[in-house]
Amino acid sequence: MTKIIVFVVILIIIFSCDATKRVPKDSYLLQKNTIIVNDKKINSPEVYSYLRQKPNEKILGIPFSLYIYNLGNPDFQVRFKSKPKKEKFLTDVFSEKQVTALGNWYKNFNDWFLKNGNQPVISDSLQIKKSLNSLYRYYLSKGYFDTEASYETHTEDQKMTVDYRIKTYDPYYIDSISTQIASPALDSIYNFNTDKHLINKGEQIDYQNFENEENRIVELFRNSGVYHFGKNIMEFWIDSLTASHKKNVLLKIPDRTVEENDSIYTTPFKVQYINKVNVFTDFSFENKNQVQADSAYYKGYTFYATGKLQYNPKYLSNAIVIEPGGVYKDQERDLTRKYLRELQNFRPSVDIKYTESSGDSLTANIYLTPLKKYSFNFDAELNTSNIKPLGISGKFSLLHRNIFKGAEVLELSFLGSFINALDVADNSKFFNARETGTSLTLKVPRIFFPFNTSRLIPKRMTPKTNISLSLSFQKNIGLDRKNITGGIDYAWNSSPKVSHKFELINMQFIKNQNPDKYFDVFNSEYVKLNEVYKILKNPDSTLLNQNDAIINFINEVINDTNYQTTNPQEYITVEQVKERREILIENFLVPIMSYTYTYNNRQSFTDNTFSTFTGRLISSGNIVAAFVKKPTDGSNKELFGQPIARYLKTEFEFKNYRELNYKSTLVSRIFTGIAIPFHNSTIPFSRSYRAGGSNDIRAWRTFRLGPGAEDSNLEFNTGTLKLTANLEYRFNVINSFNGALFVDAGNIWDITNSNLVPREGKFLGLSSLKNIAVGSGFGVRYDFSFLVLRVDVGFKTYEPYLPGPEKWFKNYNFGNAVYNIGINYPF
């Protein structure tokens, strides 16, 4: 496959190396732009963004998209018809129908190159002059009022390079800032917030800072009750009469201009208050003129309905931030619209209008259009992982909105997955494994708790409660687990950037329904026992690969103390296999309480430069166990006859996204997690850390890396400490095709006293960091807009378990690479 790709790339370069193939005569292909400021070449993406014409995109210096376009021919039909001999030859050899089919095939093939490639950028003198003017105006906006701008062009072989030369001279600075604010109310608000100015005396003049200050002032006034204020009302004046490089700045804000009854007059701006909030709960265009038949009043809010009022005013008002009696605020209007949409009870088109009442008061009218009380949803998805190469999942859901008259949403779901699993003995069917389940979730748009929490978590924080219960079954997946989970959690936002989630309880019961399949799933354990069997019994015989026979052999070795002295290493091997099996087949009750803190400074969906931080604290069984009597035999505490998983887990994850330009992004991630078991308890397999896989360290398959420097042959390696760091450069190749270059580093370790993990797999302090594995590689992604199909190729770059000189690049080749197929981005 690799050779084919390389061959195709070479063909494209050979047959398309003439970049000017489609450039018209007497025209030039724009090869390069260079911006030279004060005799120094600059590389600022911001400055280059002002150029009207940019050369064809290049990857590693090669304009692949242009070469692809050049493989097509925009005029092939005209040229074909201009050659009647060729047309006659084809019609003589083939039938008319075949010629037509051949022509259509070639047309589609030709159109694919033209559509997916990028046509050559032809240098345009008008666009060059416009670019120069844009650069000139840019430097003027940065306070370089004496800027001079010119350009030079250089041509060779129908290619042109353009040099833009800028001479800025000395910049201009702000000497003083004064104001002329006509309305007393505005003047008072402005002067009370002078510490928040975005332009200050002594700073270099920058028009962007002035625009930011204008936006700040508009936001300040409109969130202080000044309903009629807008950006087009104020002006900044910069003194142009003085020759000094220090300029005086004047902010002018006149009174409000009012047009009324064919007359125009001015009046001072004033602070306006909300005297009434009306909520129309069943508005539609069909009934907009219909009389409101039912209404209810609650703490300044009046709720209306054309029929019977379906919502409890007390609970629906929790989503309305506009406060009766408070001053008008843009922020309250926007948050109210956002919170009402999040209820999932109304259409997204939440309309909020204000009308002026007597004096300085406003009436807020909120128009809500309910969604259908019942709705059905069906979702299907294709998923893949290293354990489950291919799976098809479906989810059928029934939604019941406003079930308890408080805008709650009850969702009943049925889930099913058909999976192609690797560890199933019967591979006669492609989909040889499945997982089915059902879940019931109640979403409550407030804190559902016996005590009043409004002072601690007010409605401005959009508190939510989720109550859930689920049941799932697996068939031919591992040991065929049955999961029963129930819980209640609370979520709220303390600010636009900070969110919180508190799980009061998440009770999970994990039952392995087919523990007899252990040696089928963990085949490496059988291989170890078989080797011991040959040593202890007969080198020419084989241990019967049946669960009962294997268990009998284990018990025979463990119960015969003579093996401890005659064959100590073999005895230890059998003992470890027995202990690992008991841990992995044990059923667990996992009562979790957790808290999650999330910080996200992304401003909007269009903001591609941002960071996120997530911190989690998870406690399992420690509170529940305090109320359970300790067994007299010293074993682990049990509840309902099942052992309680008792551990404490802490996780931190930081992700940073930095847009380099409009077609490339640099993404990094750091993750650290530690799990500490308590009181002879073990951490359930599903809650342990693992390394490798399509969303982790991609040069290793899931579970195949670690712990530490141990080169284990086990199918599933887990740990209680994990450190991971990822760096990925994402870029656009052509149209919906994107590429990536990445480096992944990390590993898992064991921090317990378990004798199942050798010293190489233990975390012994900073010295263990030398066992961090490193993988690197590249990826190809196709963006379908609703999902991203991803193929990542990971190469083992540093393998900590290999001998010293072989750790670096020993298996850095396509033969030992790991090919990851994933849906959407890894992080």
Image: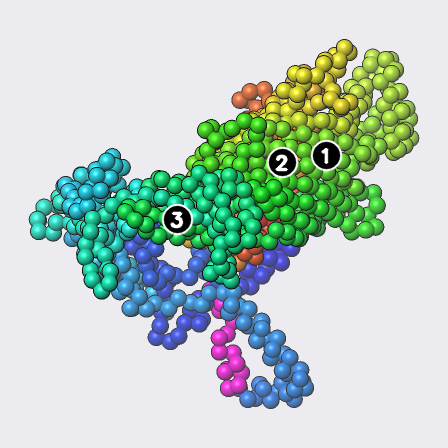
Q: Is residue 69 magenta?
A: yes
Report the magenta residues as a range: 66-82
Distance, label 3 to label 2, CA atoms, is 34 Å
Q: What's the residue type where badge 1 is placed? A: Ile
The secondary structure that most of the magenta stretch takes on is helix
Q: Nearer the viewer, mark 1 or mark 2?
A: 2
Residue at the outermost left position:
242
Q: CA distance from mark 1 to mark 2?
A: 14 Å
- Sort mark 3 into few (<14), some (14-19) or many (20+) by Cα contacts within 10 Å: many
> Which dot, 3 or 1, sits closer to the camera?
3
Q: Is residue 630 visible?
A: yes
Q: Is residue 488 magenta-colored?
A: no
Counting every numbered tag in the picture gives: 3
Label 2, residues with CA under 10 Å away: few <14, some 14-19, many ≥20: some
Q: Nearer the viewer, residue 496 or 359?
A: 359
Please give the label number shown on residue 467: 2
Q: Position of residue 482 (x, y in %)?
A: 76, 35
Residue contact between numbered discs 3 and 2, judged by CB atoms under 8 Å: no
Seen at 29% across and 68% down, the residue is 125
Q: Nearer the viewer, residue 68 or 374?
A: 374
Please, what secondary structure does the residue beneath circle 1 have?
strand
User: Between tags 3 and 2, which lies in front?
Assistant: 3
Identify the residue at image location x=46%, y=52%: 367
Q: Earlier in the sequence, mark 3 or mark 2?
A: 3
> Between disc 1 and disc 2, whose residue precedes?
2
x, y percent for residue 326 = 35, 39
Q: Which residue is mark 3?
A: 364
Please name the residue shown 36% across and 44% down the image. Answer: 275
Circles 3 and 1, Cβ within 8 Å, touching? The answer is: no
> Dot 2: what SS?
strand
